[in-house]
Amino acid sequence: MEKLTLAIDVGGSGIKSMVLKENGTPHTQNIRLETPKPAKPEPVIAAIAHLANTQGNFDRVSIGFPGVVRQGVTKGAINLHPDWDNFDLGTVLLDRLGKPVRIANDADVQGLAAISGAGTELVITLGTGFGSALFIDGKLIPNLELGQHRWRGGDSYEDRLGQRAFDQVGQKVWNRRLNKAIEAIACLFNYDFLYIGGGNAKKVITKIPENVKIVPNIFGLIGGLALWKE
């Protein structure tokens, strides 16, 4: 019997949900809620539970979370709240939803839907923050936090390319910054392919190299299926 997966994508501005069939096609519509402010664990978990209750039947849950995750425990979430440091989200959601849960960094999940599985592939996500994931021949190199790396003038990639920066400098300047970031990242990782996802990927208007691809934000949900592949 086909297993249905409730995929959740937790972001700094919104939390999205959809039930997926095993082949990656939608079983339900994509439903979104605004991320609670402040985004402490309990209100975010309540939002996830509410979304789960609106999506009907499912057999298991995949979560993309904006921070480092180890065995279901979140190790901080700079764009949510300090209370997420060392929070056992996996256990709490298992108890709340009554279904098996697997959790990964949101950029990792996006990448699992985007990559080809050959060579060095880098994923960056542009949204409230700046996420990243690195894959070598389809194998994830865990816990990469490129967004917090100091880049220009003491600022990190997230400082220069997150939502706050976009609001401050506008689309044209933000795109010039992104162009320079792509050049720097290419020298650092020597990747075969770079994928750009996240909610602000649609705001990219700069000309990008041939080995760079914009991917749809829905990949942040679809990639959750890969968390259940053995």
Image: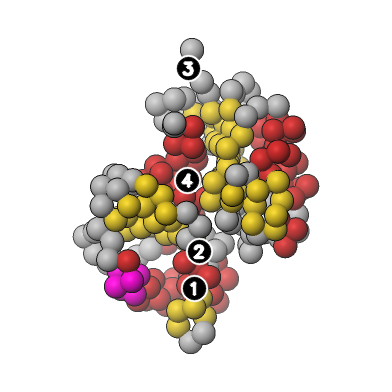
Q: Amino acid at mark 2?
A: Glu
- Residue 166 visible at all: no
Q: Secondary structure at mark 1?
A: loop
Provide residue 198's location: percent of width, then percent of height: 47, 54
Q: Say if 54 sits above or below 224 in the image.
A: above
Q: CA distance from mark 2 to mark 4?
A: 14 Å
Q: Amino acid at mark 3?
A: Glu
Q: Secondary structure at mark 3?
A: loop
Query: In what quadrant of the picture does the C terminus appear?
Result: top left
- Check contact, mark 1 vs mark 2: CB within 8 A: yes
Q: Residue at x 52, y 80 (%)?
A: 155
Q: Amino acid at mark 1?
A: His
Q: Circle 2 is placed at which residue position?
A: 145
Q: Secondary structure at mark 2?
A: loop
Provide residue 174's location: percent of width, then percent of height: 44, 73
Provide residue 146's location: percent of width, then percent of height: 47, 66
Q: Say if 155 sits above or below 9 in the image.
A: below
Q: Secondary structure at mark 4?
A: helix
Of labels 4 and 1, earlier in sequence is: 4
Outermost residue, bottom direction? 153
Q: Which numbered marker is on residue 2?
A: 3
Q: Circle 1 is placed at which residue position?
A: 149
